[in-house]
Amino acid sequence: MARIVMKFGGTSVADTDRIKNVAQRVKREVDAGQQVAVVVSAMAGTTNQLVDWTRGIARMHDAREYDVVVAAGEQVTAGLLALALQDIGVNARSWLGWQIPFATDGIHGKARIEHIDTTIMEERFEQGQVAVVAGFQGIGPDNRITTLGRGGSDTSAVALAAALRAERCDIYTDVDGVYTTDPRITSRARKIDRITYEEMLELASQGAKVLQTRSVAMAMQHGVRVQVLSSFVDAPGTLVVDEDEIVEQQVVTGIAYSPDEAKVTLVGVPDRPGVAGAIFGSLADAAVNVDMIVQNVSQDGDATDLTFTVAQADLDRANHVLEGLSDELGYKQIVADAGVCKISVVGVGMRSQPGVAKTMFQTLAEKGINIQVISTSEIKVSVLISADYTELAVRALHTAYGLDAEVVG
Ligand code: ADP
Ligand code: ASP
Ligand code: MG
């Protein structure tokens, strides 16, 4: 018998009617003879509300208690979907992260799954029972609830599919696949039938939140066949596959944007060995991830300016760390700017085709958009620009790389 994992995101379970709709989709797979594990997210808006409440009580909150609060949303959906399935005659039982268990490391708020014990689930499959699993949560070495970072139900689903050796992991969401860019930004975005793990990984890590980055890394590592599709329309979605399964490779496959960035400039940093190590070492120790970095050439050999980006959510912590280094480093000033956006163009074809960055810089220049920081990898070029120009930049680049859908009529 084939086994599949089906995952439903927040919009797909936003109210009880939609949960009933999900139950019907699950029933279809069960009737077709599949063993099914379903992973659910919290109902749309719920996790945001829970996060707001924790912040309202304590801005620098205790991460263990944060996890207790924000994991609650998925518990509700899992119970409701199990009920909806039972109501239409499908044998189903809900499971929370700790009950399976989904064993994670102890990094509360951003935990990584280390092991999933599938014993109970496999026993219940033999009895014809569907497992409805609360996504986004696990249990840490301290025996407390952990969560996997925002959007983490995708990772719960892929990890479960790997552990169960499932034939497919279907990620149901509010769009019918992965597009050349966020379809909310331009109506000209095109659905991609097949995308490589590598490209999907870059797009996700550069801001395309349709899949959580870790879920793609895990799918790539374990060879899980992931499909992204709509829970509202019956149509094939996008398959995430190995590069050799794609016949015609585009130079640029997609464009991602990330508005959740903040730019930090340290003005007047002494130009001597060890300074960058002290700054970035201290930020890493405080679990602040640094993304793009530029260091200006010092004019006088004494001092220079150092600019880098961090996630907006980490800006307070980054400032705190840097203020703590003020006496040691003797820099002049910290300037922070949260009004920036990172735009990235991604495609494996870039490896063999020069000129991708040139097109990007020219296109932005023609629109009068100033580039603040640049970074590149083998299959990606990213630039940091003012957040005011996000939509203009994405649309212009989408056209420049020939990604626009043909206008019908
Ligand atoms: P879910 O709640 O189902 O997990 P998400 O909101 O996390 O759904 O992800 C789906 C959203 O991702 C879409 O509504 C879309 O706006 C956004 N998105 C961003 N980039 C892309 C892209 N390249 N292709 C498709 N969707 C994208
Ligand atoms: N509910 C969690 C979130 O909103 C996890 C998820 O939806 O994947 O981030
Ligand atoms: Mg999501």
Image: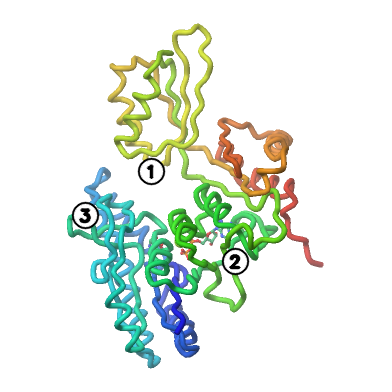
Q: Which mark is residue 238?
A: 2
Badge 2 marks a residue whose secondary structure is: strand
Spatial CA span between label 1 and label 3: 18 Å
- Above or below, 305 against 128 in this view is above
| Quadrant position of residue 222 | bottom left
Spatial CA span between label 1 and label 2: 31 Å
Q: Which mark is residue 313?
A: 1
Between tags 1 and 2, which lies in front? 2
Instruction: State the residue position of label 3.
Output: 65
Residue 71, position in %: x, y? 29, 62
Quadrant placement of the N terminus = bottom left
- Above or below, 240 against 273 in this view is below
Three-letter code, disc 1? Ala
Earlier residue among tags 3 and 2: 3
Three-letter code, disc 3? Glu
Spatial CA span between label 3 and label 2: 37 Å
- Who's the residue at 34% across and 36% down the image? 316
Quadrant placement of the C terminus = bottom right
- Near mark 3 (Cα within 10 A), the count class, few <14, some 14-19 or many ≥20, is some
Where on the image, by quarter, is ligand 2?
A: bottom left
Three-letter code, disc 2? Thr
Earlier residue among tags 1 and 2: 2
Establish whether ligand 2 lies closer than 8 Å to the Cβ of label 1: no
- Who's the residue at 31% across and 78% down the image? 121
